[in-house]
Amino acid sequence: MFGSRNSRGKSVTCIACGDSVSRSDAREYDKHGDRWDRQDKEFEHLCKACFADLCQQPRDGLETTLDAAGAGEADRETFLERFRELSESDAHGD
Ligand SMILES: [Zn+2]
């Protein structure tokens, strides 16, 4: 058995780490929250690792952070930079 075959060969880019992952392995993230309306929309994608990471944050915080970082709007480097800053200032552990 092949584990996960990439049936359409389509890959997406994780908005958090910039890795290319096959679409079937990615988690769709729609910062607008209305997943139903798929027309003319680009979805953000997160790889499993980042998705798990991000989901440790409260959902509200995540959306705010992603939005503030410019997910889907800023270019990747800018987004990552902002996201890292926001995450660090936002989510302090001990
Ligand atoms: Zn990632």
Image (tube, rainbow, N blue to C red):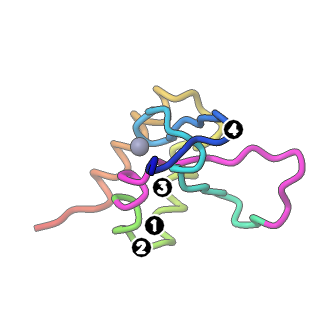
Image disc number at residue 65: 3
Asked whether 27 or 69 is in front, the reply is 27
Residue tagged 4: 8
Indicate the quadrant of ligand 1 in the picture.
top left
Q: Is residue 81 left or right of residue 89?
A: right
Residue numbers of the magenta segment:
36-52
Front of the two marks 3 and 2: 2
Residue at numbered disc 2: 58
Mark 4: secondary structure: loop
Q: Residues within 10 Å of mark 1 (few under 14, many from 20)?
A: some
Q: CA distance from mark 4 to mark 3?
A: 32 Å
Q: Is residue 45 above or below residue 19?
A: below
* Label pair 2/1, CB-CB below 8 angstroms: yes
Residue pictured at 59% horizontal, 37% vertical: 12
Q: Gap between marks 2 and 1, in whole Å? A: 5 Å
Up the image or down, 89 lies above or below 75; here it is below
Mark 1 falls on what kind of element? Answer: helix
Q: Are marks 4 and 3 in contact (CB under 8 Å)?
A: no
Earlier residue among tags 2 and 4: 4
First in sequence, mark 3 or 2: give its number: 2
Q: Given the image, on which type of amino acid does mark 4 rest? A: Arg
Badge 3 amino acid: Thr
Identify the disc placed on residue 36. none
Per the image, is 16 magenta? no
- In the rendered structure, which disc, 4 or 3, sits on the residue that comes first in sequence? 4
The residue singled out by tag 1 in the image is 61
Q: Amino acid at mark 1?
A: Gly
Question: Which label lies toward us, 2 or 4?
Answer: 4
